[in-house]
């Protein structure tokens, strides 16, 4: 469920980066205030554990598909939310750098979706109240399963919203969300069961470990109002950034408006697409066999241009030719390097 | 001694180990790109990604020069192209799955080439694939020419909290250890099960629990070892980054080139020159 750079717009990616960086700073401060210096090696090694455990796939009963452990909630249970957030963020950074899960810009989204929701929503408001201070295997089981499901649902919803807000993908919100949420409900259930089993396993064999984190007050308390305020701030910033972006670049929203109505271009026929087309028809000697939709006879052309998107056909041809040449150049340079490295 | 197994379940943890080592090995190379200050490389990679993703969704031709840029840097850094291509294909499913709907939802014809009508959806799908390849490629070139520890150091210099850097360094150090530990347990399990059967969820729970206990014990041992060496809760990172004139030159040149490629559709200008269309 990693978000990818290719589906993100800079406004959305940048906002999520700011939100994530802010959370990392805040958590770093919190962890530093915590005097328990055992946490430093513990965080590092547990991150590596999540990493290794995710690499081993298992089969999900009755489906034949495979799943893996999702780490956010498990880390929150073992480390408390702040340290867990830093740990899961570090795991995602390594995954982004070495395995290209996501990308540099999408890193903000990914850390937010997979870190903030399990650590600051699922853990304090779902797992903790259910498991309580005196956990039993049943309470741990229910709390971890529910927490993992809800955390993952929120994360999946985050992916959908970020994708749709970016507008690179054409998937409509409703269709995308109706695919993503059920899939992640199933994944969340499996993740929850595994998390529950692992936590109970630890609780049975080494109960003192869980009591340690449950008792670590400085890292345990989160107030609901603070979380809501922070999420509200993120929403406002995202909205603001998006609207600013939309208004400053006309080829975003207006573009799709234009696709529907077909105005604007017809207002200035002397300068707009008609002029270009006239020049195009005069000068098209290259690629004579290819007809461009807007380059067809005038009577039809008017209707055609109205529904035709604002792509300048001159730009398109030259873009095509130039693009192919750039590609050829890129490939030949690549081959040249390869040849050189072989001979060297 | 590692068993050679062709089973699929095995592959993931094994390839992860292999990839990490391979990238680390590449980062130890010594080329002109490797010698550039890591801060500069992080900055240039970020600008590169930002430029690529900020194009309009129907853009293809204007993005192509970025391939050229990436290939040149890759060539200078002596990173094998095949390795990179394989990695890009391996991680592509999500972007492809989401992008593949574009041709279905966006049927607006953009241009006609002979008998073939090309719709906006197809164009934006190709654009997504192109962006994807470039962004993933940029990250790989960054890591393969810099190395993880150096990137962390650069990030601290660029303002990342130190405790997060320590976390990253610790994590990276123990990933190798724990992947090997996990691999060992996994092998022990596969040797005791019938050949070719994938790992069951119930077994996995015990395996992960066991691995977690070992991890926790290890954390305790590491903490004791750190205390023995005078750990007082503060981690000191040895800092030895120096910005040379060549680094600044590289930054200026790349920045100028990237900006130029972002602002002007160079292939289109080039094509216009050749086809004679104004």
Image (cartoon, rainbow, N blue to C red):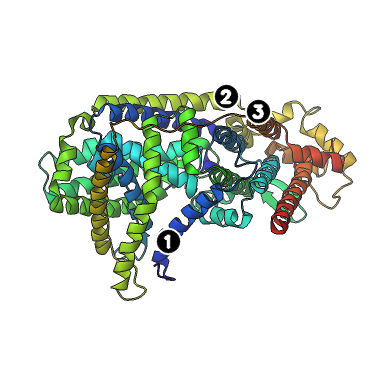
* Residue occupying image coordinates x 13% and y 53%: A204
The residue beneath circle 2 is A247
Say which chain tag 2 marks: A
Q: Earlier in the sequence, mark 1 or mark 3?
A: 1
* Residue occupying image coordinates x 67% and y 29%: B252
Q: Report helix, strand or loop for mark 2.
A: helix
Residue A330 falls left or right of residue A12: right
Q: Would residue A96 be seen by someone viewing this image from the given angle?
A: yes
Q: Nearer the viewer, mark 1 or mark 3?
A: 3
Residue A273 falls left or right of residue B139: right
Expressed as whole percent of the image width and height from the top left, the position of residue B191 reads: 31, 72
Nearest the viewer among B263 and A156 is B263
Say which chain tag 3 marks: B
Q: Are marks 1 and 3 in contact (CB under 8 Å)?
A: no
The residue beneath circle 1 is B14
The residue beneath circle 3 is B245
Residue A10 falls left or right of residue A330: left
Expressed as whole percent of the image width and height from the top left, the position of residue A335 reads: 72, 55
Nearest the viewer among B219 and A128 is B219
Residue B15 falls left or right of residue A229: right
Q: Nearer the viewer, mark 2 or mark 3?
A: 3
Query: Dot 1 surroundings within 10 Å: few (below 14), some, or many (20 or more)?
Result: some
Q: Report helix, strand or loop for mark 1.
A: helix
Expressed as whole percent of the image width and height from the top left, the position of residue A122 reads: 26, 39
């Amino acid at each position: 469920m990693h978000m990818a750079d290719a589906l993100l717009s800079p406004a959305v990616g940048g906002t999520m980066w700011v939100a994530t960086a802010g959370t990392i700073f805040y958590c770093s401060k919190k962890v530093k205030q915590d005097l328990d210096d055992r946490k430093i090696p513990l965080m590092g090694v547990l991150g590596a554990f999540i990493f290794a455990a995710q690499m081993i796939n298992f089969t999900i009963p009755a489906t034949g598909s495979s799943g893996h452990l999702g780490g956010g909630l498990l880390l929150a249970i073992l480390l408390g939310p702040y340290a867990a957030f830093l740990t899961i963020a570090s795991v995602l950074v390594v995954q982004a750098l070495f395995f290209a899960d996501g990308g540099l810009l999408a890193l903000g989204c990914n850390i937010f979706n997979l870190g903030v929701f399990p650590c600051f929503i699922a853990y304090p408001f779902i797992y903790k109240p259910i498991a309580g201070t005196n956990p039993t295997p049943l309470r741990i089981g229910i709390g971890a399963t529910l927490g993992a499901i809800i955390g993952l649902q929120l994360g999946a919803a985050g992916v959908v919203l970020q994708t749709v807000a970016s507008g690179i993908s054409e998937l409509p919100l409703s269709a995308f969300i109706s695919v993503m949420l059920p899939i992640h409900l199933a994944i969340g259930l499996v993740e929850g069961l595994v998390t529950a089993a692992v936590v109970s396993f630890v609780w049975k064999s080494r109960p003192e470990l869980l009591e340690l984190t449950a008792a670590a007050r400085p890292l345990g308390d989160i107030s609901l109002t603070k979380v809501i305020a922070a999420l509200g701030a993120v929403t406002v910033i995202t909205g603001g950034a998006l609207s600013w972006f939309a208004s400053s670049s006309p080829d975003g929203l207006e573009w799709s408006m234009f696709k529907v109505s077909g105005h604007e271009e017809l207002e200035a026929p002397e300068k707009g697409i008609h002029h270009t087309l006239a020049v195009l028809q005069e000068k098209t000697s290259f690629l004579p066999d290819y007809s461009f939709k807007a380059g067809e006879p005038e009577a039809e052309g008017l209707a055609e241009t109205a529904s035709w998107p604002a792509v300048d056909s001159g730009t398109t041809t030259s873009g095509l030719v130039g693009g192919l040449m750039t590609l050829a150049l890129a490939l030949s340079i690549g081959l040249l390097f390869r040849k050189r490295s072989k001979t060297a | 001694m590692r068993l050679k197994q062709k089973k699929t379940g095995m592959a993931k943890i094994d390839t992860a180990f292999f990839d990490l080592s391979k990238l680390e090995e590449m980062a130890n190379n010594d080329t002109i790109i490797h010698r550039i200050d890591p801060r500069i490389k992080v900055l240039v990679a970020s600008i590169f990604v930002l430029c690529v993703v900020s194009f309009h969704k129907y853009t293809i031709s204007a993005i192509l020069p970025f391939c050229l840029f990436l290939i040149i840097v890759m060539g200078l850094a002596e990173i094998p192209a095949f390795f990179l291509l394989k990695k890009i294909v391996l991680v592509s499913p999500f972007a492809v799955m989401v992008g593949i709907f574009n041709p279905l939802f966006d049927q607006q014809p953009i241009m006609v080439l002979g008998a073939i009508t090309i719709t906006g959806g197809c164009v934006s799908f190709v654009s997504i694939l192109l962006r994807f390849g470039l962004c993933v490629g940029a990250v790989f070139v960054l890591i393969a020419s810099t190395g993880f520890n150096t990137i962390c150091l650069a990030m601290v210099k660029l303002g990342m909290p130190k405790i997060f850097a320590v976390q990253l360094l610790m994590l990276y150090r123990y990933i190798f250890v724990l992947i090997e530990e996990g691999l060992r347990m996994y092998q022990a399990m596969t040797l005791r099960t019938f050949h070719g059967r994938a790992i069951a969820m119930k077994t996995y729970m015990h395996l992960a629990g066991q691995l977690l206990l070992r991890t926790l014990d290890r954390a305790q041992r590491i903490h004791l070892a750190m205390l023995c060496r005078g750990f007082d809760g503060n981690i000191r990172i040895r800092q030895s980054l120096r910005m040379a004139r060549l680094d600044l030159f590289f930054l200026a040149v790349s920045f100028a080139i990237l900006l130029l490629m972002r602002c002007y559709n160079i292939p289109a200008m080039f094509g216009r020159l050749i086809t004679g269309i104004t």
